[in-house]
Amino acid sequence: MKIGFDLDGVFINKPYFIPKYIIERLYRTGEKVLNYRFPNNFEILIRKISHNPIFRSKIKDNIKFINELSRTKNSLFLISSRFSFLKKETEELIIYNGFNKIFKGIYINYLNAQPHIFKDEVIKKNKINIYIDDDFLLIKFLAKENKQTKFYWLNKNINKKITKNLLAITKLSYIILSL
């Protein structure tokens, strides 16, 4: 089985000191609109600072789970929509956490495409069977575009089926039921 994972919000926490609504304003054109914008120079500086590992801790349970899952027959893919201005930070993070040894494929959005379009293309190209992300609007779009793929929205509060191929989960290890 081919399983894809987002990076931020799945393996790396978002910065605790920045409220969610501010993060949404820095990334999207609107809170309920699936349209991401490339940041201006000042916002790039803020985002580079906020991506420092000091401000973004590992999600230890999820990293432990992915290490265990990597010992199975499944092929694992890391699919992140981080933009090119975070290339150095992202590559250091991947090596530091050993992700380069865990994942069969690592796809990062260094060409600065719209994140949902980038992830849709990677999922289709690699024929991903299962994909996990913490961005609800994005994963809802992906689920509509990829009916044969099972999607999991990783969140803090809800465990339930949303659509035929989209489920909400509060723990990454819950995907084991699909394997």
Image (cartoon, rainbow, N blue to C red):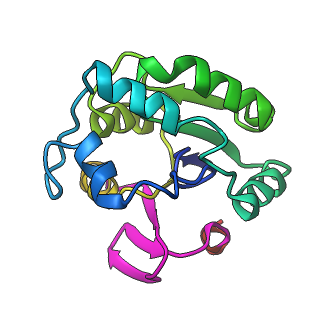
Image quadrant in which the C terminus is located? bottom right
Q: Residue at the location (26% across, 31% down)?
A: 114
**Residue 23 painted magenta:** no
* Residue 87 percent across, percent down from the top left: 53, 19
In this orientation, does residue 18 appear? yes
- The image quadrant that residue 36 belongs to is top left
Does 98 sit above or below residue 111?
below
**Residue 157 painted magenta:** yes
Q: Residue at the location (61% across, 39% down)?
A: 77
Highlighted range, magenta? 146-173
Does 130 sit above or below residue 84?
below
Towards the viewer: 29 or 77 = 29
Is residue 40 toward the left or the right of residue 102 in the image? Answer: left
* Residue 152 percent across, percent down from the top left: 46, 64
Give the number of callouts.
0
Towards the viewer: 19 or 122 = 19
* Residue 54 percent across, percent down from the top left: 66, 42
Towards the viewer: 25 or 95 = 25
Does 9 sit above or below residue 45?
below
In this orientation, does residue 125 appear? no
Q: Residue at the location (60% across, 25% down)?
A: 89
* Residue 172 percent across, percent down from the top left: 62, 66
Q: Residue at the location (73% across, 36% down)?
A: 99
Is residue 33 toward the left or the right of residue 22 in the image? Answer: left
